[in-house]
Image (tube, rainbow, N blue to C red):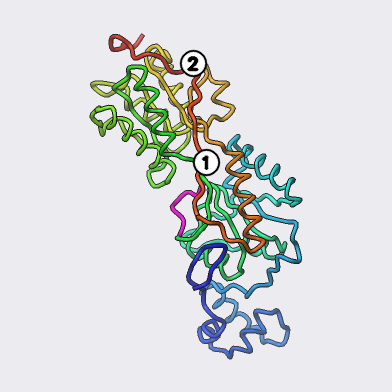
Amino acid sequence: MVRTGSASVAAGPTLAVVAREAGVSVPTASKVVNGREDVAPETRRRVTEALDRLGYVRRPRFDAAKAPGRVDLIVHSLDSSWSGAVLHGVEAAAHDAGLEVVVSAGLTRTRGARPERGWLDKLIARGSSGVLFNLAELTSSQYAWLAQHLIPFVMIDPVLEPPPGVVSVGAANWQGGLLATEHLLSLGHERIAVIGGYRRKICSSDRIAGYRSALASAGIRHRPEYVRYGSFNETGAHRRMLELLDLPEPPTAVFVCSDKMALGVYQALAERQLSVPDDISVVGFDDLPESRWATPALTTVRQPLSEMAATALRLLVRMMAGDQPEGTRTELSTRLVERASTGPAPATSWSPR
């Protein structure tokens, strides 16, 4: 096993395995790996194919001491205010630490069953001292590549539960789901629905777990038909809200697991000529700028995105210096931000206008 940062993952194939696969000697395989010219074209082709097929990565050329002032930030995309908040937090913390940040988007996606290696090759070539991943979903092979190059890294809000030992920073999502639901309960709502994001994403499942816990503490029966899943976008949430409105006993309030999804909920309610919050109260999650621009302004759970990113950068700096964080998971508190989209439960059931 090889350790990277605090992650333990299995090492990849050795050069001897590659040589055996290609039917050549280890010294010949080594010449191909190191770009030597004295190798026959056909032999080079066989070795290169074996390298790609087995997922072999050149042994570390990475040396943090050569580039102590540079780190990489790899984000899912750059087209959202979420990414903007993360970039702001990383930039501010990097400035304080005297670091340069290289930002790349969408480079950890996979093509079929085989992970793309270009982003890692570029990382190695730049000689960065460490990596921050935001909303990343790494494969076991990609974790292994990082391990083989001994590159410290920190995950910001990972999509899936990372392997044991991987350092990550996120929000207290269970607490946020609890706060959102308790707020609606305090307004007299009992028919409270929830629209989550992807089922397998840990932040979504944790927020829904908090919702269920709040209902249970209030002695309110959990209704399976009130739990719906979208795709963390407006379109999916719009569809799920219409499904909820078509139930024989529709909800009087809905907790939506992202502000972006809440905008889709607003659209569905407007199409049915329902008023927020007079007919249905809505609570979002994130506290992005869109939540303040919505009409009415959206009550939401604030997760400290910039603070999460800055915390991750500071942890990475410690790891680059050889320090081991005490724990692998850091959670920052969430809090409810009350605005105009929530109100008392209606005295009588609403009807379309």
Relative depth, front residue between 214 and 339: 214
Question: Does residue 159 belong to the magenta stretch?
Answer: yes
Q: In this view, does 47 lie above or below 156?
A: below
Tag shown at residue 178: none
* Amino acid type, mark 2: Ala
SS for callout 2: loop
x 39%, y 32%: residue: 178
Crowdedness near tag 1: few (<14), some (14–19) or many (≥20) residues, C-alpha within 10 Å:
some
Q: Dividing the image into 4 quarters, which one contains the C terminus?
A: top left
Relative depth, front residue between 166 and 321: 321
The answer for how far apart the CA atoms under marks 1 and 2 are is: 26 Å
Tag shown at residue 332: 1
Where residue 119 appears, as percent x and y from the top left, is 63, 59
Question: Does residue 55 belong to the magenta stretch?
Answer: no
Q: Earlier in the sequence, mark 1 or mark 2?
A: 1
Relative depth, front residue between 157 and 93: 93
Magenta residue span: 157-163
The residue that mark 2 highlights is: 340
SS for callout 1: strand
* Amino acid type, mark 1: Leu
Crowdedness near tag 2: few (<14), some (14–19) or many (≥20) residues, C-alpha within 10 Å:
some
**Left/right of residue 42 with respect to residue 144 in the rendered view:** right
Q: Is residue 97 above or below residue 319?
A: above
